[in-house]
Amino acid sequence: MKLDQFKNRNVSGYIYYKHEEPAKTGWEKFCKVFRRSVKLELFAGLWIVFMEMAKGKKNSHAMQYPLEKMQIFPRYRSVHKLLRLLESGNERCIGCGLCEKICVSNCIRMDTKTDDKGRKFVSEYTINFGRCIYCGLCAEVCPELAIVHGDKYEYASEQRSLFGLKEDMLTPASTFKNSGQKEFEGYGSLSDNADKCVKKTPLSY
């Protein structure tokens, strides 16, 4: 079907583009470039940008980064954190290894030891953030709510394999009381009606 015949067809919902003949001479090429460069749409866009700049910071929709940070919601799955018990300040992690087993990216490694009293504790805990897909399964399966997703989303690195060590993710013991750690409300935490949903164990009857 020829182009002229196609244009004459009455088809609703279509916008036909008028084909422009290619420029042959140098003057035609110059006029074509001039028409495309100095159209009114260019000045209209520049005028809108100038008016937004003239409004100032109060009426601006842009965020003044890095002076202003984006508000992160509790269930945002960002860089991991290891929490402590609010009552005693001890580490919540009991070294069960469920997070290491359920990790689909195979990026969590932990090493456990026993102390003088025969109690198991976690000596080494690392996460390869270069392989982590932030699925949240580790936080969801943790029985002690020890590993959670924090609010730190700025985590640029110069290397492909970026490891998060236990010392970097764990809440510091020296500044635990003044660190502002609260009960976690994000991904993997217990809901308000968790007591009603969880059934009692057979030994409690």
Image (cartoon, rainbow, N blue to C red):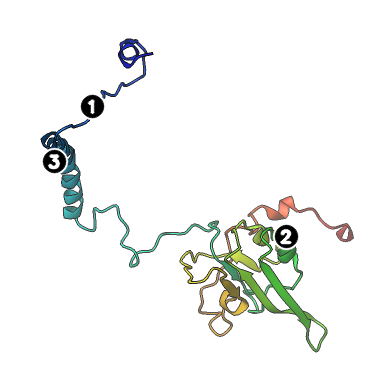
- Disc 1 element: loop
Within 10 Å of disc 1 (Cα), the crowding (few <14, some 14-19, many 20+) is few
Please give left or right for residue 177 compared with residue 13 in the image: right
User: Which is more toward the observer, 28 or 77?
Assistant: 28
Q: Mark 1 points at which residue?
A: 20
- Disc 2 element: helix
Please give left or right for residue 122 compared with residue 8 in the image: right
Query: Which residue is depicted at the point 17% across and 47% down?
Result: 46
On the rendered image, what quadrant is the N terminus found in? top left
Measure how far apart labels 1 and 3 are at the Cα level: 18 Å
Q: Are marks 1 and 3 in contact (CB under 8 Å)?
A: no
Indicate the amino acid at tag 2: Ile
Measure how far apart labels 3 and 2 are at the Cα level: 60 Å
In the depicted structure, whether residue 3 falls above or below residue 68: above
Quarter of the rendering containing residue 64: bottom left
Query: Which residue is depicted at the point 76% across and 69% down?
Result: 96
- Labels 3, 2: front one: 3
In the depicted structure, whether residue 6 falls above or below residue 40: above
On the rendered image, what quadrant is the C terminus found in? bottom right
Indicate the amino acid at tag 1: Glu
- Disc 3 element: loop
- Labels 1, 3: front one: 1
